[in-house]
Image: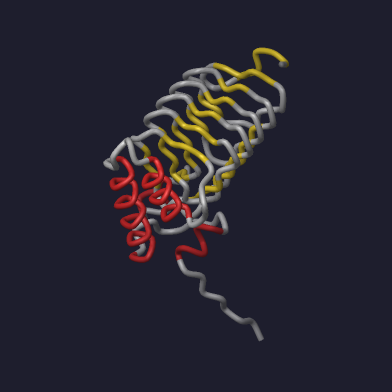
Amino acid sequence: MTVNIVHSEKQKMLQGQLYFPSDKILQQDRAIAKKLCQRFNQFDIDDRKGGRKILQELFGYKVSAWIEPSFYCDYGYNIKLGKNFYANHGLVILDAAAVTFGDNVMCAPGVLISTATHPLDHVERQQGLETARPIKIGNNVWIGMGAKILDGVSIGDNAVIAAGAVVNKDVAPHTLVAGVPARLLRQL
């Protein structure tokens, strides 16, 4: 006898399967995250402790990091920040899948990190389906201004992503990448 297992859209999203982001539960989760981002972006800049409390509520754990406002994400609960994480203004993380940062990661202004993507098949796209693949960023990584990190990418320890780079493939440790798409410039 075969058992049909029905997965929720949230389970499908977290497992990297095609899912409907228009699902009511996912819409509610995004609304909660958007409200927390809005609160964070409007907090009194002299109250960093209050800002960290909002980030803790958003991520679901105690944060030993700092993000300059403005900051936006889709869910928050899929983001794991390492120690001494710092992001300058304008960080956007579309976290339909896990986004994991190592320790001592720095993001310059205007960085975009997106786990979400849409199917190449136009019929699936028209149905409103999407997928998400996790992103892993190692220790001591510097991501330059305006860089974009795409779904499914891993960035090795001590790597540097140059300003404006579009990273669509894994980046080896101790390397500098730049360009669109990002290519190896040199070993560090």
In the image, residue 97 sits, relative to residue 24, either above or below, namely above
Near-viewer residue (63 or 174): 63
Question: How many numbered marks are there?
Answer: 0
Picture residue at 44% right of the left edge, 33% below the top: 112
Residue, far top: 185
In percent of width and height, residue 122 lies at 41, 46
Q: Visible in this render: residue 159? A: yes
What quarter of the picture does the C terminus occupy?
top right
> In which quadrant of the rendered view does residue 44 lie?
top left
Near-viewer residue (164 or 32): 32
Residue, far bottom: 1
In percent of width and height, residue 17 lies at 54, 57
Task: From the viewer's perspective, tell me whether residue 175 is left or right of residue 56.
Answer: right
In the image, residue 113 sits, relative to residue 4, either above or below, namely above
Task: From the viewer's perspective, tell me whether residue 151 is left or right of residue 109.
Answer: right
Task: From the viewer's perspective, tell me whether residue 56 is left or right of residue 24.
Answer: right
What quarter of the picture does the N terminus occupy?
bottom right
User: Is the image coloured rainbow, by chain, by secondary structure, or in one colour?
Assistant: secondary structure
Picture residue at 33% right of the left edge, 59% below the top: 27
Q: Visible in this render: residue 123? A: no
Picture residue at 71% right of the left edge, 23% below the top: 174
In percent of width and height, residue 183 lies at 61, 19
In percent of width and height, residue 28 lies at 33, 62
